[in-house]
């Protein structure tokens, strides 16, 4: 698989209590086309900041982001970015929320609507197309937010802890669902999470981040077809906990 996205030496500082604090230090990463990569680390280690830099939401102090051979540093809208909150417009239906990227890009709305209608069943939303966000469960809101992200038609999706606010049963259901659709739609994904089990379920590659300041410290390849609870996965978890300094 060819490399589709590359982060090169990204560093970022923020002003906290009147002093500059280095949050992310020379973080570099590559993503291959069709790969599902997960970044895992403790809360506050810089995972979300790294994702925001990739998405162009903020500008790095140093470093660059290259997508399909083009430098896109601090250029928003090039990649599909889904933050932790669903950020659905409460007065718009599921279908109209999903159409927002096409409206912002001033694309052909008829074609976009046809694509949304084709994707609604894929995302399990065919019976909710005309519902408003307040009529949806937490899981359905996240499905709608992910559909909207896919409608950016970006080649890479950046997902920042999309299931963190859900109950355990719904979270597990959506993890398995995301794994299935990412494979069927051949999505290239970077997921940020602090949930090791979630990372193992979804990923083909897992990258660890430590904080103060944030930096990548180790990566693991997830064996295909190995089920959670197997000796191989138990050993992988042990190595991940050890790398993160958790006993």
Image (cartoon, rainbow, N blue to C red):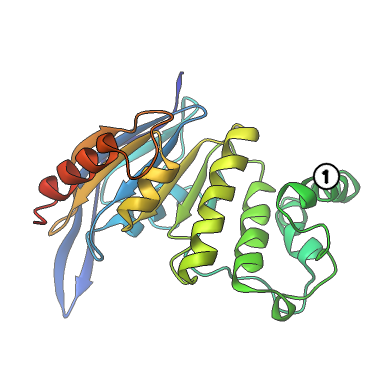
Residue 202, placed above or below residue 90: above
For the residue pair 247 and 228, the one nearer the viewer reads as 228
Where residue 46 appears, x then y in whole percent? 26, 58
Q: Quadrant of the C terminus?
A: bottom left
Find numbered disc 1 in the image and state the secondary structure of the residue it sits on. Answer: helix
The image shows a total of numbered marks equal to 1
191 sits to left or right of 118: left
For the residue pair 55 and 45, the one nearer the viewer reads as 45
84 sits to left or right of 38: right
Tell which residue pokes out farthest to the right in this image: 110
Where residue 48 appears, x then y in whole percent? 35, 58
Where residue 74 appears, x then y in whole percent? 43, 49
Residue at position x 46%, y 50% in the image: 55
Where residue 27 appears, x then y in whole percent? 23, 42
Tell which residue pokes out farthest to the front in this image: 230
Label 1 CA crowd tier, 10 Å (few <14, some 14–19, many 20+): few
Residue at position x 64%, y 59% in the image: 143
Residue 216 in view here:
no
Residue at position x 16%, y 57% in the image: 211
Residue 162, placed above or below residue 92: above
Residue 106, placed above or below residue 220: below
161 sits to left or right of 63: right
Disc 1: which residue? 118
Residue at position x 70%, y 48% in the image: 151
Quarter-wise, where is residue 137 in the image?
bottom right
Residue 116 in view here:
yes
């Amino acid at each position: 698989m060819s490399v589709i996205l590359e982060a090169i030496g990204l560093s970022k500082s923020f002003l906290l209590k009147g002093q500059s604090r280095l949050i992310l230090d020379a973080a570099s990463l590559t993503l291959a086309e069709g790969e599902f990569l997960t970044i895992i680390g403790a809360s506050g280690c810089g995972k979300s900041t790294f994702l925001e830099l990739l998405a162009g939401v903020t500008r790095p102090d140093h470093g660059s982001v290259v997508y399909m051979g083009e430098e896109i540093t601090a250029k928003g809208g090039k990649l599909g970015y889904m933050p932790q909150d669903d950020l659905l417009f409460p007065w718009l239906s599921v279908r109209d929320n999903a159409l927002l990227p096409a409206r912002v890009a001033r694309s052909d709305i008829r074609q976009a609507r046809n694509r949304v209608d084709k994707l609604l069943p894929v995302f399990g939303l065919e019976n909710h197309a005309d519902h408003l966000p307040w009529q949806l469960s937490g899981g359905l809101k996240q499905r709608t937010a992910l559909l909207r992200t896919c409608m950016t038609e970006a080649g890479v999706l950046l997902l920042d802890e999309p299931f963190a606010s859900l109950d355990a049963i719904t979270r597990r259901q959506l993890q398995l669902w995301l794994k299935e659709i990412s494979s069927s739609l051949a999505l290239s994904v970077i997921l940020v999470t602090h949930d090791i089990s979630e990372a193992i379920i979804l990923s083909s590659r897992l990258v660890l981040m430590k904080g103060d300041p944030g930096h990548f410290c180790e990566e693991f390849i997830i064996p295909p077809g190995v089920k959670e609870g197997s000796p191989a996965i138990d050993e992988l978890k042990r190595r991940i906990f050890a790398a993160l300094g958790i006993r």
